[in-house]
Amino acid sequence: YLMDLNNIALAFLIANVGLILVLPRRLAALPLLLGACYITRAQGIELGPFNFTCLRMLVAVGFVRVIARRERLAGGMNSLDKLMLIWACWLLFSSQFHNDPSGMLVTGLGLVYSTCGIYFLIRVFCQSQDDLVWLCRFMVIILVPLAIEMLSEKITGHNFFSIFGEVAEISAIREDTFRAQGPFGHSILAGTVGAVCLPFA
């Protein structure tokens, strides 16, 4: 058992746990978005070979909420839900073909937990087109402070999110310019988030 949560991350985690539990269903996905966008993967709890980041802990709380409130998937299981489960099964099965099957199985379990957990929670929380529009609106709003931080990082080369670990305090340089990455593992991932969220905006 190893805990790596500084005071800021712990306060952030507690606040978002409370939000997941008390927000109305259509807004309950917001803490998941906040957890994905504002805390690095270095903050969390290690239990043996398993790493529970802040986001993964929020997913667990989300499932507690769903069970406690008896919330369900809108319209039951659909084809995309089944494809997600097939993908998860294949990912775990294919880990046995790697040079380190046990290590890849642990990695696969973490990936399946995070991906399927977030996917199915969003499916529960967003049950109509109106719910999706609400989520997109709030997603754009919560990304504004992140965009400002990354713009500052692009100019100064200092990454504020380095206080949470995993990301460097001084940004990488390419062709004499800083590459902003914010809380994400790489600047390419940061750019991917922006590219994916732009159509929603």
Image (tube, rainbow, N blue to C red):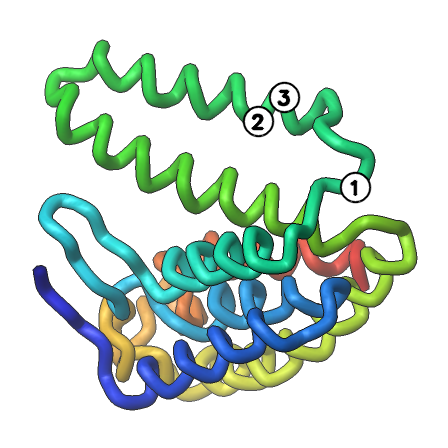
In the rendered view, does 104 fall on the left or right side of 85? left
Location of residue 168 in the rendering, given as x and y in whole percent from the top left corner = 25, 72
| Amino acid carrying mark 2 in the image | Met
Q: Answer yes or no: do the residues labelled 2 and 3 have beta carbons within 8 Å?
A: yes
Label at residue 82 = 3
Q: What residue would you read off at disc 2?
A: 84
Identify the residue under disc 1.
74
- Tell me if residue 179 can be seen: no
Q: Which is closer to the viewer, label 2 or label 1?
A: 1
Residue that appears at 32% across and 41% down = 110
Whole-angstrom CA distance, mark 2 to mark 3, is 5 Å
Q: Amino acid at mark 1?
A: Ala
Between label 3 and label 1, give the one nearer the viewer.
Answer: 1
Asked where in the image residue 19 lies, by quadrant, the reply is: bottom right
Residue 91 at x, y = what percent?
38, 21
Q: Residue 125 vs residue 93: left or right? A: right
Which percent across, then down, holds residue 49? 13, 44
- Work out which quarter of the rendered image holds the N terminus and state it: bottom left
Q: Residue at x 49, y 63 (%)?
A: 36
Q: Secondary structure at mark 2?
A: helix
What secondary structure is found at the residue carrying circle 3?
Answer: helix
Residue 41: where, in percent of width, then height?
A: 32, 62
Q: How many marks?
A: 3
Q: Earlier in the sequence, mark 2 or mark 1?
A: 1
